[in-house]
Amino acid sequence: MMLGTARAEAGTIPRGHVDLGHYPDGPITSAVMIAAGRADGPTLWVQAGVHGPEVVGQLAIARFLRGLDLARLRGRIACLMVANPLGFRGYNRLTPQDGMNLNRVFPGKPDGSITEQLAHRVFELAMATGDVVLDLHSGGDLTITPFYVIYHKGSGEASARAAELSRCLGSRLQWGSDEDWMNGSAITNFARRGKPALIVESGGGARVRDEDLANMQTALTGMCQAMQMLPGTPPTANDVRYGGNAVHLKCTRGGFWHPLVEPGDDVVLGQPLGRMVDIWGDVVETTTCSYERAWIGSIKRPYMPIYNGDQIIELVEAVDG
């Protein structure tokens, strides 16, 4: 296997770069790594950095591969370290050149805007390389997420397989969604082309914790075990919470955001989730749960000064498995 300048040979982890586009003066590239086992088997495609400030994924990939026993690995793990180098270097969730969100424009267009062309290139690389796709995310610099896995809730075989795999990654928060925004996500478009695909999230809030890196490594190990690329039984979580669709709660008053819950918490209808405090210290707005049962999918980092209209909480409806 070749991925950019990295050539996979059994028992090695080559590094290299792959071209994703063009700056005015040269190629836009991303670092790549391939872990090649000594025995033949499937290929897991892992990508990180779809959103610029989300850096948990890259760090977790590097740590996971450094600790991998290639003698026990069947097949290959192909890793695209930074799917959006423009957002990464600009430390921006969006692509600075056109203001688009890469994870809303898949499968992209070969003749579209720079983000659409980037999506097309990443999509074609992954489709040509991987049998299963794992897309690593976090809350970046503005929000914090719990350790959860999300997949496209569809009727096809790939979506059904993704739902099975979601139980093997060690997370208690397992989320099948068919919300409108997912039409342009990488995982939905992979599933529609017959490739099981999942997003794993953990952390954010402008910091990386060892816990977040450990969560990602648990998910990577579990995926490889579920695909029979590594020996062992995939990790399963206790006290599982299944997710349906979500609502993205926005504030109507600006100020300092004071959350009353943590990412991943179970909440019920009417429960206070957080307060907006103005410059005088007065509470000017309280946000409450709008579902009968739900859990917190993401939350704006505590005491962040924000404008009215900003998203403060992603509220995931709790459903029966």
Image (cartoon, helix red, strand yellow):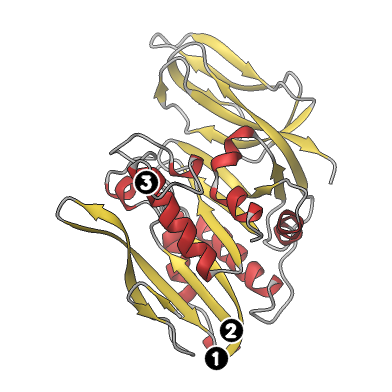
| Helix, strand or loop under label 3 | loop
Q: Earlier in the sequence, mark 2 or mark 1?
A: 1
The residue that disc 3 covers is 111
Give me the C-alpha separation between circle 1 and circle 3.
40 Å
Marks 1 and 3 in Cβ contact (< 8 Å): no
Q: Is residue 199 above or below residue 301?
A: below
Estimate the x, y position of residue 42 in percent, counting from the top left: 62, 77
| Label 3 Cα neighbours within 10 Å, binned few <14 / some 14-19 / many ≥20 | few
Q: Residue at x 46, y 81 (%)?
A: 1
Amino acid under label 3? Asp
Closer to viewer: mark 1 or mark 3: 3
Q: Residue at x 84, y 46 (%)?
A: 321
User: As rendered, which of 176 and 289 lies closer to the eye?
Assistant: 176
The residue that disc 2 covers is 73
Estimate the x, y position of residue 77 in percent, counting from the top left: 52, 74
| Helix, strand or loop under label 1 | loop
